Image: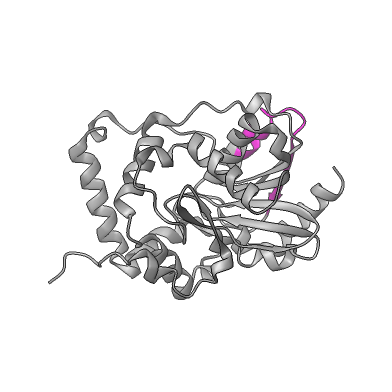
Amino acid sequence: MKLWESLIPFDEAVATIPEDNFVEVEGERVHAPVSGRETPLVLLHGIAAAAFSFRLLRPLLDGRFQTLAIDLSGFGYSERPQGLSAYHPVEQVDRIVEVMKTRGIENADFLGHSYGATLVTLLASRHPERVGRIILLSPASEFKPPPWYLRNAVALWGCYFATRMLLSKPEKFRKIFSRSYFRRDVFDEETAERYRRALLIDGLRSSFVGYAQVLGGAFPKLAWESLTARTLVIAGREDEIVPWESCEKLSRRISGAEFETIENCGHSAPEEQPEELVSLIQRFLQHS
């Protein structure tokens, strides 16, 4: 009897994905679907998510924007790098710029969700010439190191094994990850299974260790106060992952930032309230 579900080979996982949804960066395939026209808008997802989380949002934006949704290293249908340095935020934002170049996008507006919002902020400081206006959706702004007793190899591998066990139990996975939603009906069995299987792709161990190092203390200090790009911060009123109060407090640290709230919404606004989110995006980008 298997202890846990086997990982899915990458080529098998992406077999049905259109080839033009991928670009190659440093010899690795990055899932970066682009659609729509007019103003480029780059969409960056959060931890354990994927470009899939923007599936309801992108069709609503395509009439006015050219959306580029990127699966970050370790998630979705992007190939999992073996080198741990690839998961460091600096390496990730540099890779995002390379994806933009490959797609022929020199400068864009950005929407970053949760962890994706921190990458947008870092990208704005490293590559300001690439960034127009930015939207920080439920931004994760604090990364506290884990307790000392979890900062060793034994604890790390214990957490990895626990993660493999969780990913092998669909019902438990759905129950735990549903905390990201206030509207729990949105996270149905089919949606949960898409997310679960996208995490079960070969290369999970490298990405797990890479992100563990970053979130365990290797994340660079973010200069929220020195952001010069015009910024909108959006929070879900019922967010249990990044509380509304945290987002509102962060917005006051950013000079000139606007702040908006989406009611009856948790941490997953692109799936829970896509129409309301699009309205806020369009209002901000068309009048700023």
Q: Residue at x 53, y 43 (%)?
A: 95
The answer to which image quadrant residue 223 occupies is top right
Q: Nearer the viewer, residue 12 or 274?
A: 12
- The image position of residue 40, as x and y in percent, is 74, 52
Tell me, yes or no, whether the highlighted magenta stretch contains residue 191. no
Q: Horizontally, is 183 left or right of 263 in the view?
A: left
In the picture as drawn, the residue positioned furthest to the left comes out as: 1
Nearest the camera: 67 or 140? 67
In which quadrant of the rendered image does the N terminus lie? bottom left
| x 52%, y 26%: residue | 221
Colouring method of the image? one colour
Q: Is residue 192 visible?
A: yes
- Which span is picked out in magenta? 247-262
**Is 269 left or right of 196, judged from the image as shown?**
right
- Is 258 magenta? The answer is yes
The percent coordinates of residue 271 (x first, y second) are: 60, 63
Q: Quadrant of residue 151?
A: top left
Quarter of the rendering occupied by the C terminus: top right
Question: Residue shown at 42%/52% (left/top)?
Answer: 74
Residue 135 spot, x, y in % from top left? 69, 44
Asked if residue 224 is positioned above or below residue 8 in the image, the reply reads: above
Instruction: Indicate whether 126 appears above or below 201.
Output: above
Q: Look at 29% across and 60% down and name the residue there.
A: 166
